[in-house]
Amino acid sequence: MTAITLAAPLAGWAMPLTEVPDPAFAQGLVGTGMAIDPTVNELRSPCDGVVLSVHRARHACTVRTASGAEVLLHLGVDTVGLNGEGFTAHVQDGQSVKTGDRLISFDMDLVGSRAQSLVSMMVVVNDGYTVDGQSVDREIAAGDAAMTVHGGSGADAAPTPAAAPVESGETAERTVPLRIAHGLHARPAAALVAAAKAHPGTVSILCRDRSANAKSVVALMGLGTALGDRLTIRATGPGAQGVVESIAGLIDSGLGDPVVEGVAAPAPAPAATPAPAQPAAEEDIGPPFAPGEEALLKGTIAVPGQAVGSVVRRFRSGVRVTEQGAGPEVEEPRLHQALERVISRLADSAKRMPDHAAIFQAHREILDDPELLDSALTDIRAGKSAEWAWQRTAQMQADALAGLADPRMAERAADLRDLEQQVLTALSGKEPSAGLADLPAGTIVLADEILPSDLAGVPAGRLAGIGMAHGGPTSHAVILAAALGVPTVVALGRQAERVPDGAPVVLDGNRGELLVFPPEDMLATTRTAVAARAARREENRRTSREDCRMADGTRIEVFANLGRVSDAPGAVVEGAEGCGLLRTEFLFLERQSAPTEDEQYQQYQQIADALEGRPLVIRTLDVGGDKPLSYLPLPKEENPVLGLRGVRVGLREPELLRAQIRAILRVKPAGICRIMVPMIASPSELLAVRTMVDEERARLGRAEPIELGAMIEVPAAALIADRIGAVADFLSIGTNDLTQYVLAMDRGNPHVAAQLDALHPGVLRLIRLAVMGAKTHDRVVAVCGGSASDPMAAPLLIGLGVTELSATPAVIADLKAFIRTLRLEDCRRVAEAALGTDSAAEVRRLVAETWPGL
């Protein structure tokens, strides 16, 4: 054993590692040593040795001593993010150095102003060495004795490993993308090493034809990894598969660094993964429901309405594909030709449904994603078939999307599954099926998840209803179902698989229910009711464009919720008196860069023109940690629903918000538009946005003011609505988010989503508080959430003081007709009684007893 004294590489205040403001260093995860808060701008070698590596960001380098100790010298905390700015390297990899030689110089003012800290670390990072005698808690000069390293056995010795590799025939491998902005710098490298060292066998990381020992911080840093690199984890020894999966998960979660969204999700390497078509074993859901075995399944409302009919099952089974291909020269052209055929069919679908061409264009953009194609081609070049490669890639990315916190983004997984099936069909040489277009009229379809392509050719009036075991209420398939007027319930769960073909059912899209094998008298009654509703709906549509007034003359405005330009004309036909909520996310999602001010203006103007002078309430961008944008870097959050959302993102990214404000201000005629700000929790947030609006209005030379409203979506906003109303021109209650926050139930969680009900008395009490607060300033209160489309909610909301409802276009004609039968006195009485109940079920029972025609 030898000992070597390391000299201080910097002058400054010496301190123990435990005081470093970086947990990886402070907890000894990177290695053992000391730190210095520098007073000079030059880093010098602490010993004679060889430069193993200089980090590509030039903020760190490693010197190997004659005894084999690897000494990492790291300037500052979080300096990797400067990407080399302010640093100059004076040595290169493999260069011999002497104690005191200059290694790196740096701009102390620049680095000090932009890094978390200038405190710099000197640590021994490899195993087999111990450190003592650190000279800390004092001023130290460059070159002073700083600490002693013990271990090794001379110049020719290699570092002693912590444990000899365990020989075993078991090997495993997996490839994942690196989603860390600055690659494997010291902190994430240390976290990876800690995981690798728990494995007795060897663990390597491969990147761009280079390999590194995963148990060495220096080796990992020396790979020079960057955001988007694909890392292959390779392990040998007992439990190799487990350690590979564990490290892959750590890499995908960022290894302690923020994850950059939009980088492709991890994909198992072919060598370690069975063919993706093999379904995982699942628990037994029970036998099919027997005739006469009445069963009630609860789901989530997607498209309101009722239907009665016989079930046709469309549950998909895993498709088995051949793994080995005929070689890249055969398989690559096959895949390209299949993609071209699918793209051509998407164009045909867009022509058949021009109002929803954007959906099929979004599918085209997915197929153009280079990450998707490159991943499949990588597998093909490794000898796999086009079918196997495409299926594996599509399934892995779909699973990653399905795991996202935001329900809307997670529902895009259905688009990938749709494209997976379409491309596989094209590869088989078969013609695509007619989807659901060839089913008998009046069919109720049950499926695990209906895909957009299933509905592309379905004529209006063909299907009676749709029930899905999975899926969400804002999926592309649901949008198409709503356009066809097909009542739809989603998230019914796997019990839906027990419903046999031909079973008579009642599907209730107003309640989110599916009743299987109902009594004959109920079937007959429901058929009669559905027919009567259809006739009544046609009658209601004839008067839908008239103003909505209650039986006693009270004026209630009924607006439409819109999500894209093509929604507006249909909403006017259904009787919308304006748009109470334009969800502008359609402009920002599913693209690689933010829309320009002109792009936004043109879309808003088209919607305003289609509304023919009616009011247009535009909600500013409502994205955040739960609705990630690839071009908007936001920190990864453990609970994004409670994090950076709505107005919080707008205030964090003011230029994005200002561009949207300017686009809205440009819409003609002036005064037709109102601005609505999501997720307001305090008056100060709205005041900050109002300041922006006034400043942008002045820059545009617009004299006319514009109304600015606050969405009431969090309980705090409802409780201080009087304070928010003092600075808002109007309030609009978003019952979807308000309900999930009040009931502490994530509406994206399938285990509790069916229990979410905006008619819970706790939610209704908060709505009353919001209305009372708004009245102190004579502000209008609207409801633009899901309950505005629920006929059972209308009398309660009106009774609580709401004077404007913004609903799904498909229900507007019926909603206006129902409101015309109501009297304000009755609504107030029932609403007050509802506040005294204990559950949403009691509330709904109360409403049904008062207005039995619902």
Image (cartoon, rainbow, N blue to C red):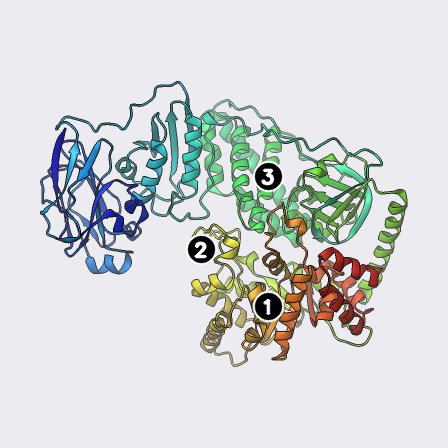
**Mark 1 and mark 2: span between their CA atoms?**
30 Å
> In the picture, residue 715 is in which quadrant?
bottom right
In this view, the mark in front (3 or 1): 1
Where's residue 501, x and y in %?
78, 34
Kindly indicate whether the residue at mark 2 contacts the one at mark 3 (C-beta within 8 angstroms).
no
Q: Earlier in the sequence, mark 1 or mark 2?
A: 2
Distance between the Cα atoms at labels 3 and 1?
40 Å
Nearest to N terminus: mark 3 or mark 2: 3
Residue at the spot 79% in from the left edge and 74% down from the top edge: 825
Q: Which residue is mark 3?
A: 417
Classify mark 1: residues with Cα within 10 Å, few (<14), some (14-19) or many (20+): many
Of marks 1 and 2, the one in the foreground: 1
The residue at 29%/23% (across/down) is 164
Q: Quadrant location of the C terminus?
A: bottom right
Front position in the image: 635 or 386? 635
Q: Position of residue 204 (x, y in %)?
A: 34, 30
Q: Which disc, if any, is residue 718? A: 1
User: To which residue does mark 2 refer?
Assistant: 632
**Dot 3 amino acid type:** Arg
Mark 1 residue type: Ala
